[in-house]
Each structure stands twice: as C-alpha cells, then as structure tokens.
Amino acid sequence: MQRIVVLTGAGISQESGLQTFRGPDGLWNNEHIEDICTPEGFRRDPLRVDRFYNNLRAGLTAVQPNAAHLALAGLEQAARDGRWQGHLTIITQNIDDLHERAGSHDVIHMHGELLRLRCTGCGATPAWHGDCFPDTPCPVCHAPTLRPDIVWFGEMPYHMDTITQRLAACDLFVAIGTSGVVYPAAGFVDSVADHADTMLFNLEARSGPSPFDQTILGPATHTVPAWTQALLAQ
Ligand code: APR
C-alpha cells in the first residue's frame, strides 16, 4: 500500500485563473502582508481585510477546478474503487475549494478556507459564500465578531497533529505549486526525508540546492495528470 502525501500551493490553482501570492502577478505585489494577513492588520482595519477576502471569495464562483485538481481527485477515486493500491492525503495551503469541487474528499486545509468564517465570540465556524463586514452578526451568537477563517501569519496552522501523523506514515511526499517560503509547510519535505521519496512539481526550478529527490518542471495541468496516469498504469 503506497501512502502518498501531496502538499499543494497557489500554483495548482493558477491555471484555473486564481492569482498566486508571489511571482509576476502575485497578490502580495499589491497588498502588504502585514496589513492583510495578520491579526494585527485585522485589528487595525477589519474592513480592509474583510474586503480583500470578500473579493477572493466572490472570485471563486468564476473559476473551475483544472486538470491538476481533477488528476488528484481521480487518484483518490482509484484508491476507493480498488484500481490503485494506495492512500492519498492532500494537505493544501490554499483557501479555495477547487480540490473539493474536483471531487477530492481527504483534503486538509492547513491555512483555513475562504468559504468559512470564524466567530471570535462564540467560536462558531459557519460556512459562508457571501460578503462579510465588521458589523455582520454571527449566525449563532449574533454578535458582530466574525472574521475570515483563514490562518494568518503569526497564527498556528490548522490540523497540525493530523498533518504530522500523515507525514510520518507516508512513503512519497509530493509538493505541487508552492514557493516553499512559508513554514511550517516549507519544512515538510525535510521532515520526511529519512523515510519517504520526495517530488517537487513547479513551473520553474527553485534557486539553490533542492531538498527534493526529483523536480518535475512545467504547468501543473500537464505534469500532474501525467504523473497520476503513470501511477495508475503501474
Ligand atoms: N503550475 C505549477 N506551478 C506553478 C504554476 C503552474 N501553473 N503557476 C505558479 N506556480 C508556482 C510558482 O512557481 C510558485 O513557486 O506556484 C508557486 C506559488 O507560490 P506562492 O504564490 O508563494 O504560493 P504558496 O507557495 O501557496 O504560498 C504559501 O504563503 O502568503 C502565504 O498563506 C499564503 O498559503 C500561502 C503561503
């Protein structure tokens, strides 16, 4: 039984039309991370932060999963119906819902999800598809204490216990479309190096020595389906 853990980043959703964070058209080229993606930034100007995530959330309705998302969902489906003797876990840094819309079920959103809010009053995490503003009442406690359910810099990523277990048990770790600059995700490859093979799928090679055994360059919609088809043909 092959146990694969895939870590995805913004690059897997780029060909669906969602902006990445860094690179030529990156979201962080036009916004300061400390204003948008930190608890302090939210405290300083909650309306600005709410508007940023409202725009991203609205943008989801205009995009579809791409061949890379679908290839990973197909691999999970093949495991479910016995065409592949393996187990696939997707750990995603992405806050979009494209893995789920592609059909993946075992998806761990370590940085939270755009389509969910969190009430800092009662802790409720309601699914949310519309806009949220500083005075939007929590549907549970009715207080105006909702925030995006996104893990900001300086906050602990979600599901780290499960992530640690899955990484410890895998025999193949695959990173797709991530710049590898944000921890703890950027350190996953090092944490599995003693017991798993590692593969990096990216548009371009990273500078400096690579911690990955293998690097496959090219757009994810080409390289990821080719990889999963080869796996299923084995
Ligand atoms: N196919 C494959 N890789 C791609 C593609 C593509 N079509 N397009 C872009 N990439 C690669 C880029 O080369 C880059 O290495 O995807 C990566 C995107 O990097 P980032 O924009 O930094 O996104 P990510 O790594 O997910 O960022 C990590 O940073 O700001 C935080 O919380 C945010 O989750 C995010 C985290």
Image (tube, rainbow, N blue to C red):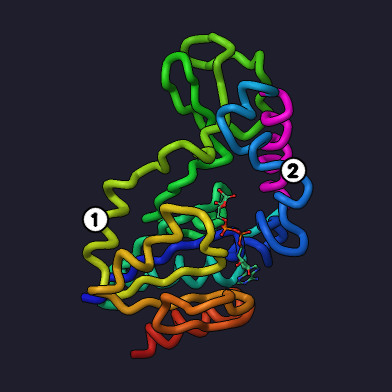
- Spatial CA distance of label 2 from label 1 is 35 Å
Main secondary structure of the magenta stretch: helix
Q: Position of residue 12 (x, y in %)?
A: 58, 65
Q: Residue at x 54, y 54 (%)?
A: 101
Residue furthest out toward the front: 208
Q: Residue at x 32, y 53 (%)?
A: 163
Q: Residue at x 39, y 42 (%)?
A: 158
In the depicted structure, whether residue 219 falls above or below residue 29: below
Location of residue 198 (image quadrant): bottom left
Asked if one can make out residue 39 in the rendered structure from this viewpoint, the answer is: yes
Q: Position of residue 212 (x, y in %)?
A: 42, 77
Instruction: Quarter of the image for the C terminus: give it.
Output: bottom left
In this view of the protein, which residue sits in the foreground, 69 or 120?
A: 120
What amino acid type should be assigned to the residue bearing mark 2? Glu
Q: Secondary structure at mark 1?
A: helix
Q: Horizontally, is 129 left or right of 82 in the view?
A: right
Quadrant location of ligand 1? bottom right
In the depicted structure, whether residue 53 falls above or below residue 211: above
Instruction: Quarter of the image for the N terminus: give it.
Output: bottom left
Q: Horizontally, is 41 left or right of 154 in the view?
A: right
In this view of the protein, which residue sits in the foreground, 51 or 24?
A: 24
Q: Which residue is mark 2?
A: 31
What amino acid type should be assigned to the residue bearing mark 1? Gln
Q: Position of residue 204 (x, y in %)?
A: 63, 78
Q: Which residue is mark 1?
A: 165
In the depicted structure, whether residue 183 falls above or below residue 149: below
Location of residue 134 (image quadrant): top right
- Numbered range of the magenta stretch: 46-62
How many numbered discs sit on the rendered protein? 2
Using the image, tell me which numbered label, if any, was put on residue 101.
Answer: none
Instruction: Please tell me which of labels 2 and 1 falls first in the chain.
Output: 2
In this view of the protein, which residue sits in the foreground, 229 or 218?
A: 218
